[in-house]
Image: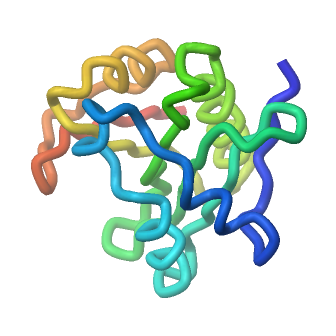
């Protein structure tokens, strides 16, 4: 599956903010506009558009958390039209590879709403394990290596 992660730029940011989850998932993830704005102030955050060939299908953002010094995957949003096609799994796998290549990355942390069973199953299948913490109402899981 030709899935690529690309920089969010002047040319594609408006398309990126049009991406939306299903109505049931909207409470689980911040809008992409918020995430892009957040990345301008949290300078270690990296927002990326997820493409299948030349079609934007989603958004992911990762970064070094200034509070705990860990790398986090902060956002994953696959547009409702493109869900259940493997794009989220492929994108998260690519982010894991990017972060594993960093010398200062010992683990990756991710958070998700406890009611978001699809996210929990996806992350668990990629090796993330709950660490027993709940932050801002989200279950926290880690991938250690």
Horizontal and vertical percent position of residue 145? 54, 33
Horizontal and vertical percent position of residue 132? 14, 34
Q: Is residue 126 above or below residue 48?
A: above
**Quarter occupied by residue 141:** top left
78 relative to 128 in the view: left or right: right
Q: How many marks?
A: 0
**Quarter occupied by residue 96:** top right
Task: Tell me which colouring the rendered structure shows.
Answer: rainbow
The residue shown at (61%, 62%) is 47
81 relative to 55 in the view: left or right: left
The residue shown at (33%, 48%) is 29
The residue shown at (88%, 41%) is 54
Q: Is residue 20 above or below residue 46?
A: above
The residue shown at (21%, 37%) is 113
Horizontal and vertical percent position of residue 26? 30, 43
42 relative to 68 in the view: left or right: right
**Quarter occupied by residue 3:** top right
Please name whichever residue, 43 or 104, is drawn nearer the observer in this view of the structure: 43
Horizontal and vertical percent position of residue 87? 65, 26
């Amino acid at each position: 599956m030709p899935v690529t992660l690309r920089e969010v730029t002047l040319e594609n940011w408006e398309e990126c903010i049009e991406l939306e989850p299903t109505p049931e998932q909207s409470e689980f993830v911040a809008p992409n506009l918020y995430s892009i704005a957040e990345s301008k102030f949290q300078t270690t955050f990296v927002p990326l558009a997820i493409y299948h060939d030349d079609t934007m299908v989603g958004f992911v953002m990762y970064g070094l958390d200034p509070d705990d010094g860990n790398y986090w995957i902060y956002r994953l949003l696959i547009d409702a039209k493109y869900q259940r096609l493997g794009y989220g799994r492929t994108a998260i796998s690519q982010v894991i590879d990017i972060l594993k290549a960093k010398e200062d990355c010992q683990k990756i942390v991710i958070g998700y709403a406890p009611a978001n069973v699809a996210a929990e199953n996806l992350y668990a299948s990629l090796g993330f394990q709950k660490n027993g913490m709940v932050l801002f109402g989200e279950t926290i899981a880690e991938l250690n290596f």
